């Protein structure tokens, strides 16, 4: 008669645990691999939608519509700094040249980023879109959630005379001479807005050669 394996034995428990862990690990690896291409495609599509949002194109019939609009409008993508995620998107919108600069920084709780569309003069803001990883809802998160706040950037001067000008300040602190390039900060979000200012200074400066090349 075959001897019954003692399932209460420590060796059995250890072997069972190892086998179970290996099976689960292989299962997770398989799921990750099988979904990786789809996940990367979704991330790429989200970036395209954010780029278009800087041009005030935010409504799409479906994902295919977003892809088609991106292909029609974005004519070139040039990486200025892969490490700093500095990218220039050259666009044609209604027959006019637009240049979208990607910007990246740190907010109060985590990364913040955005896309600033410039007119053909490479100075004046045509539109802007910003996003965040973990800013506070109703406060710092307004940099993404409030289109009205983003719309304030339209017509502002982002860069001139080798200087990054674009900034945000409390309305009461904005001097008359600063109005052409300064936007009213999000109420109650001083630290997030400080991060936005730092993001502008550090990121836009990366495009100096591009912006100076008229």
Image (cartoon, rainbow, N blue to C red):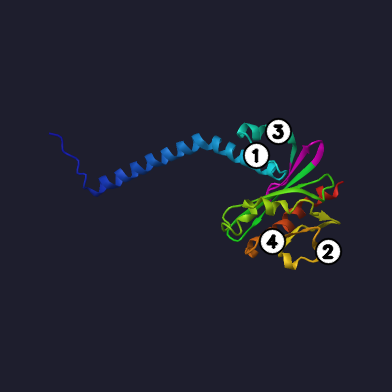
Q: Secondary structure at mark 1?
A: loop
Sequence-wise first label, 2 or 3: 3
Sequence-wise first label, 3 or 4: 3
- Kindly check if marks 1 and 3 are in contact, taking CB atoms under 8 A apart as contact: no
Q: Residue furthest bottom?
A: 173
Q: Which residue is mark 4?
A: 185
* Residue 128 x %, y %: 71, 49
Image disc number at residue 71: 3
Sequence-wise first label, 2 or 4: 2
Looking at the image, is mark 3 or mark 4 nearer the viewer?
Answer: 4
* Residue 60 x %, y %: 64, 36
| Residue at x-position 84% and y-position 56% | 162
Instruction: Decide: few, some or many residues near mark 2? Use Cα within 10 Å; few <14, some 14-19, many ≥20.
Output: few
Give the magenta-colored segment's residue range.
78-97
Image disc number at residue 177: 2
Residue 81 belongs to magenta span: yes
Sequence-wise first label, 1 or 4: 1
Q: Is residue 44 above or below residue 191?
A: above
Cα distance, mark 2 to mark 4?
17 Å
| Residue at x-position 81% and y-position 54% | 159
Instruction: Decide: few, some or many residues near mark 3? Use Cα within 10 Å; few <14, some 14-19, many ≥20.
Output: few
Q: Which residue is mark 1?
A: 59
Instruction: Decide: few, some or many residues near mark 4? Use Cα within 10 Å; few <14, some 14-19, many ≥20.
Output: many
- Kindly check if marks 2 and 3 are in contact, taking CB atoms under 8 A apart as contact: no
Q: Nearer the viewer, residue 85 or 151?
A: 151
Residue 85 belongs to magenta span: yes
Instruction: Decide: few, some or many residues near mark 1? Use Cα within 10 Å; few <14, some 14-19, many ≥20.
Output: few
Sequence-wise first label, 1 or 3: 1
């Amino acid at each position: 008669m075959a001897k019954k394996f003692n399932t209460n034995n420590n060796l059995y428990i250890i072997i069972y645990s190892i086998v179970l862990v290996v099976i689960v690990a292989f299962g997770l690896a398989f799921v990750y691999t099988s979904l990786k291409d789809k996940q990367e495609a979704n991330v790429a599509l989200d970036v395209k939608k954010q780029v278009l949002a800087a041009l005030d194109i935010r409504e799409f019939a479906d994902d295919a519509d977003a892809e088609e609009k991106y292909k029609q409008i974005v004519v070139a993508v040039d990486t200025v700094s892969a490490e700093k995620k500095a990218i220039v998107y050259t666009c044609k919108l209604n027959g006019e040249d637009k240049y979208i600069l990607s910007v990246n920084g740190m907010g109060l709780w985590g990364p913040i980023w955005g896309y600033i569309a410039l007119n053909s003069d490479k100075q004046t803001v045509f539109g802007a879109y910003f996003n965040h990883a973990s800013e506070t809802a109703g406060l710092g998160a307004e940099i993404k959630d409030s289109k009205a706040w983003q719309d304030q950037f339209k017509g502002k001067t982002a860069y001139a005379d080798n200087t990054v000008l674009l900034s945000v300040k409390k309305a009461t602190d904005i001097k008359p001479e600063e109005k052409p390039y300064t936007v009213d900060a999000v109420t109650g979000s001083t630290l997030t807005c400080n991060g936005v200012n730092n993001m502008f200074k550090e990121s836009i400066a990366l495009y100096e050669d591009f912006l100076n090349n008229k």
